[in-house]
Image (tube, helix red, strand yellow):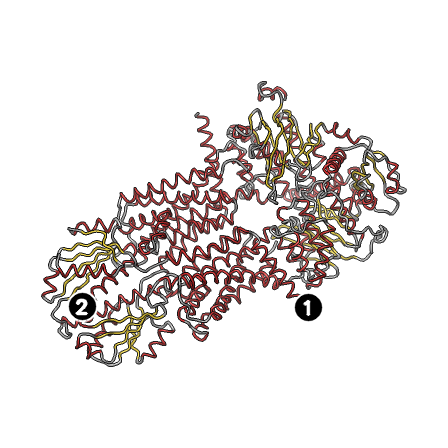
Amino acid sequence: MNTAHAARFGPSEEGAFVVRAEGLCKRFTGPDGKPFDALGGVSFEVAAGRLTALVGPDGAGKTTLMRLMAGLLHPDGGSLSVLGHDTRREAQAIQNRISYMPQRFGLYEDLSIQENLDLYADLHGVDRAIRAARFARLLEMTDLARFTARPAGQLSGGMKQKLGLACTLVRVPDLLLLDEPSVGVDPLSRRDLWEIIAQMIAEEGLSVVVSTAYMDEAERCDRVHVFNKGEQLAEGTPDELRRRVRGLTYVAPPAKDEPARDLQARLIDAPERVVDAVPSGGEVRFIRRPECALDTLGDLLGASPASARPEELEDAFMLLLREHETRRADEADAARPASGLTMESATHFGAQDPQSVIVVRDLVRTFGDFTAVASTSFDVRRGEIFGLLGPNGAGKTTTFRMLCGLLPASSGHLEVAGVNLRKARAEARKRIGYVAQKFALYANLSVRENLEFFGGAYGLRGRALRARIHAIEAQFELEPAAQSGTLPHGYKQRLAMAAGLIHEPRILFLDEPTSGIDPLARRAFWRTITALSQSGVTIIITTHFMEEAEYCDRIAIQDAGKLLALGTPREVRAKAGDAGRDMNSAFIAIVEQSRREKAEALEQRRAGERAESVA
Amino acid sequence: MSASASGFRVRIVALVRKEMRQMLRDRSNLLVGFLLPVALILLFGYGLSFDVKNAPVAIVTDQPSLGARELVAGIEGSAYLSARPVATMAQAEDLLGSGKVDAIVRIPVDFARREGQGHAPVQLILNGIDSVTASTLEAYIAGAVSKALAHRMDRGQATGGEAGQVEIVQRIWFNETSNSTWYLVPGLVVLIMTLVGAFLTSLLVAREWERGTLESLFVTPVRPLEIVLAKLVPYVLVGLIDLAMCLVAARLLFDVPIRGSLFAVLLSSTMYLIVSLLLGLFISGTTRNQFAASQVALLTSFMPAMMLSGFVFDLRNVPVGVQIAAQIVPATHFMAVIKTLFLAGTDWAMVMRSVLILGGYALVLTVLTRRTVRKRLD
Amino acid sequence: MDRILSVLFMILTLIRKELLAIFKDPANRIVLFAPAFVQTLLFGYAASFDLTNVPYAVLDQSRSAASSELLAHLDGTGVFRRTATLTTPDQIAGVIDGGSALMAISIPADFADRLAQGRSAPVQLILDGRNSTTAGSASGYVASVATAFNARHGGGGGVTLVRRAWYNPNLQSRWQIVPAMVATLSMLQTLLLAALSVAREREQGTFDQLLVTPLTPLQILIGKSIPSIMVGMLQSTIVLMISLFWFHIPMSGSVALLYLGLVTFTGASVGIGMSLSALALNMQQAMLYTFLLIMPLTLLSGLITPIRNMPQVLQIATYVNPLRFGVDLVRRVYLEGAGLGDIYPDFLPMFAVAAVTLPLAGWLFRHRLA
């Protein structure tokens, strides 16, 4: 591997560095017309033959950095050289040698998988002689060989991502740049993607720079650079970074009968003492501030005994970000939990109302001969947080759209608050709130105008509307005059939530509300959700962040339209048996088992048919 | 050197193949590329006509006389007019008001007497709402009236005086029957080339910007000029197929002659097609937004091709300012050539001049377009 | 009562949102109104069938007082401009082919003699038929000059045509075209605006959000149609103002009736646009479909060429084209001063189109999903 490397990078090429940045600056004009620094003087080096991660929340400058390295943007200050070429003067030379997968994969949706591969192979001048073998290998690794004739536009998100990656690997690039390759992809596809990358590094000695918001992905990298707001906060191996939080990380079980999320809520509401807290496996993992000893947290923990746990990269990341944010004393901190919601006593709705507000019986939806949702039944009780989990294309969104009355069911019984929303009169629809996947907002209207519209559409007006808008703007810390289309992703999500909650619905539908959102913003989001649930709102949510399932009272796992598991997070983990250490592995285990069974059943049936035909 | 040349060839072929596939798989593209031209050919060939035929004319004869009868007979005899005798003026005015007739010819009470005196006015009332039809009708009626009189004079029934008559013998060159289809159809070639060129291609680069595909295309050995050239090829083909359809339809369906050399037709059409394609790509690369691009394309290429190129509205009739603006529009130069090639024949000096002008446009636009797809996101 | 008020308020909210969404975008403000200005002026000046400056060539082989007088008459009209004086007949082809003259007048050597002998004296007129409409008008002018010449010399049998053109006394084509633009230009953009309004929301995902609110499809339809109609009326008003105060084309009819007609017409256009919008999967398709439709609608509207010149089949097809009746209605109310009694037949087809397309769009909103 190393000799292959030395052959490609002569000793003349700056030793073993593929990227070298010094005082790198990039300035853009903000939506308010003022210039801001997307990158404010960043210096770092990327070693050859390594897997390097750029991590950071929204707006950290990761994508800008990627584009600078690809020669698509010109730096405003400092210098950047890639593979020994200056990006300003020799962009084409760099582009001849590297491969780059942008966030939107750069696939031609109307071309088939094979055609996309051919196109990029031709553009990179891949020799026809070696092409067949290379394609076969890539298709095998990505498991796309069966679909080569299918247009890229008809692939699931995970498959698109894999195809995007395959297109960058039609030849062995001297440097591979991957910009957030796993955003919006389910755990199974994410795992596959990383396996391919690992394999290519092992076999071909690739140099890879990948940007990501997932810490478990950064954990796999040789070196991690942490960015926030255009600055580099830290760099090092995952081990080096982890060392920063040594001795600060704990895990605590909630008191008897208390949901883990209530303890988590108490902890995260005390940011001056606690850096971070998340529910996990029925307990709460948290990080204390270095300056606050564990015994100062007694009032928050109550009777729960906290025990130390091994530190993880995510802990280090959270600590770095919190420290940086405190240094910046940034008022508009996306991570602060929404404050307007009062914490009612946790026991009030702790034991859920046994009455079901959503009843689903034998729900089926087919599109032509494709079954998107197959005979699904579940109930959601009042005040519950109900999670609908599943890989891309599992039928989550279809189920969701049927619940909201946006799509008629092919058959089965469906009831939300006692009625079928598709046939219900306007009054019934006033009781539900809906936050769509893409945070559907009117992009060129201001925050206030969006809220005024949705408030008005739900029949609020006059003083009542104004009062409600003020309340909700305060609750979600929204700037009324800001134009919604130019808001950062995390703010858009908050505005979408505000719009969905403006009429104080009793039932709230959230479709993948945390997709593409960084860990800080996700914490704040879930704090809002748990507070809402405590005030008695029923919440139905889809997500493919499995650790988020821990916030739910009950979850359902769907795959290929089928309901595979239903129950409390603990029950679902138990169902997965040994694999159920955490939600992510439990999920993968359950889905894979079901797929295996299905394949076996198919095999058996085929064997049976063969036997019959022989007989 | 030869390695880079072969790299260029491989890339161009790959990009052209990609563009072809994308074009063929997008149904709405094909609708605009082929269905709309067919619809336009049929509409222009069969549907649109400025020619007045059998226009209903109300005739009011207040007092019958031999002269009046012959006058009416003259109008009735005209192939363009269809006479409708009406008893009273009030009735005739009703018909004109409700659009049932286009004109009233009134032969007054003292017509016979005044004719004898050598000064007999005949009243003609036209509906001016459609001024083109009205003007044409006036000419036809005047022609019919003077024919009737000449006829009478020849037979010595009318007072001709001792002076002779100036008689206009007209010949319309290139379009002997004065059929408007003959000039609408060649003009249509310009319109369709503009449509395929500017309108369809205006969406191309913008679409790649919107979908984010250019970003990954940029980070390959591809050169900006290759991207532009590859986008031209499929649409040049569509344009040429449309041209062939126009030529066949003109010849077989509408009997419009194609008197010039086919080579000259092809040469100038291809040249214009390339100019309008480049214009579309330039607009697309500048706006980077499909909606804006299509709007700009309509306003800057399609509208001028329709209005300012001398297609329907003769440039000789417009104010100087508009004439100057028209000279800037590439379609104007192609329009003059294609009409001449269809109806008059090959005027090589004219063909070469406009091919040179269009070539100049193509050169400038290539440079400009290449700049809009430089490999930069900021 | 309160329920009705509440529903009205909800629709008003939607209308307000639509208007804000349209007008907050500076590019939209330009795209919606600048073309109306530019195109009205362009059509007003460029769309002319009236001869103002016809270049012609003369081959005067008679060189007599009579021929000079005839040519002086021709020059005196102000329409013709002599660009070439030829000496031999074979030069004619050169000036006509190259386009330096639209027509050539050839006066034979025996012209004056024949006139003096009281015989008819033919003058040959050769016209460039590459634009046969212009050629036809030019020939009409020359004929009238000849008639006038004859009358002056006591010829022509003494019969003169005294022309009077109703509603457009000087038969200016501008009068024919600019008022028709009041309907045509607004149609172009209201159709597109309506077609994009739902397609855009669908593409941005906001349409689902709209459908889960208590608003019914009918209410959404109303809330989305009214802003498009308002924009259409605004554009019509701009064109009307230009027509009245820039081109000084006098308005003879009732403004109220004109606007009543325009509202009906725009309603029908919006209905077509909304249906297209509900059918299209994305904005690009909505745009292309609109464009595919606009071309035939404009060509078959009688805007430039009369409906009566079309074949029977096409004439029947024009009944579903609201623009045909919109153009007719505006022209007749504006130029002719027609009253409701005269033009009510124009309303019926437009009502019919609106009555079919608007409910169809409402139905498609809910059933064209997934």
Above or below A227: residue B332:
below
Label 2 marks a residue whose chain is C
Between the residue at mark 1 and the residue at mark 2, the CA separation in whole angstroms equals: 81 Å
Q: Which residue is mark 2?
A: C152
Do marks 1 and 2 share a subunit? yes
Callout 1 amino acid: Arg
Note whether residue C7 is visible: yes
Q: What amino acid does circle 2 point to?
A: Arg
Give me the disc on residue C363.
Answer: none
State the residue in front, A162 or A142. A162
Q: Position of residue B65 (x, y in %)?
A: 21, 80
Task: Give the left or right position of residue A390, taking residue C70 as reference.
Answer: right
Helix, strand or loop at disc 1?
helix
Q: Nearer the viewer, residue A500 or C348?
A: A500
Question: Residue beneath label 1, please?
Answer: C3
Give the quarter of the image for residue C16.
Answer: bottom right
Q: Position of residue A328 (x, y in %)?
A: 72, 37
Task: Name the quadrant containing residue B155.
Answer: bottom left
x%, y% of residue B182? 31, 55
- On the image, which quarter does residue C55 sit in? bottom left
In this rendering, position of residue C19 left or right of residue A239: left
Q: From the image, which quarter does the N terminus of chain C lie in?
A: bottom right
